[in-house]
Amino acid sequence: MTVTTEFTSTDLTAHESDTVRALSSASNRDELRRVFGHVPSGLVVVAALGPDGPVGLLASSFTSVSLDPPLISVNIAHTSTTLPVLRNADHWGVTVLGRGQREVADHLRRPASERFDGVDWAATDNGAIHVDGAAAGFHTRVEQLIPAGDPVIALLAVHGHFAAADVEPIVFHHSRFRHLEQENPT
């Protein structure tokens, strides 16, 4: 049974209303970022073959959008210096990093020209880049880039995918890398 409760700002107490208002103000971005950090997410590498080799970035905003048609999305800061190069590529690889790929995540935090140094990767015929040893991945074609506040939402059509049954994903939570823990069945 699913219960859905709807409320409006008029349903909030005075204190709750002030809290909601404070969190939405531009002056409180650090606090909002901290609250967003309470939501665990996977880490993905979004990458394509550029004129000088692979280009890409690390993102924690991956979302499955639709099964029919198969769509995913990822948010990329509109200030990203990698985004202009990605915009020139029709096909992107979206690689879900695995538990043992923290070093790859660290590489993707480097300056753009050094991100793939020491990282094993492969390109599709269409130039989508995938990182080797990943938990999963998607070969995509860019459907639409939608400006949405700080980021650009990249809506991507899935043209291929893979998953490694024996590779657990790495998780990003409270600005730290974490691993999933399996519950014991009762």
Image (cartoon, rainbow, N blue to C red):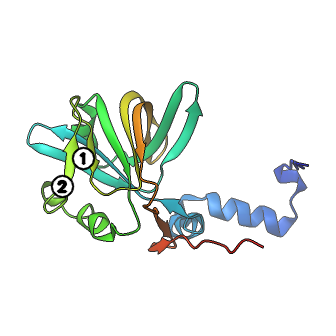
Give the answer, above or below, for where 39 lies relative to 148. below
Q: Position of residue 158 (x, y in %)?
A: 43, 31
The residue that appears at 88% across and 48% down in the rendered structure is 2
Give the quarter of the image for residue 142.
Answer: top left
Residue bearing the label numbered 2? 112
In this picture, residue 96 sits left or right of residue 148? left
* Front one among 81 and 39: 39
Give residue 104's quadrant in the image: bottom left
Residue that appears at 48% across and 40% down: 73
Asked whether disc 1 touches disc 2, contact meaning CB atoms under 8 Å apart, the reply is yes
Residue lying farthest to the left in this orientation: 52
Q: Which secondary structure lies at badge 1?
A: loop
How would you rate the neighbour count of disc 2 (Cα within 10 Å): few for under 14, some for 14-19, many for 20 or more?
Answer: some
Hey, what amino acid is under mark 2? Ala
Local secondary structure at mark 2: helix
Residue 105 vs 121, above or below: the answer is below
Circle 1 sits on which residue?
Answer: 82
How far is mark 1 from mark 2, CA to CA? Answer: 7 Å
Q: Amino acid at mark 1?
A: Thr
Percent x, y of residue 61: 48, 52
Residue at 21% across / 34% down in the picture? 127
User: First in sequence: mark 1 or mark 2?
Assistant: 1
Q: Is residue 81 visible?
A: no
Q: Position of residue 184 (x, y in %)?
A: 69, 75
In this rendered view, identify the residue nearer to me: 183 or 38. Answer: 183
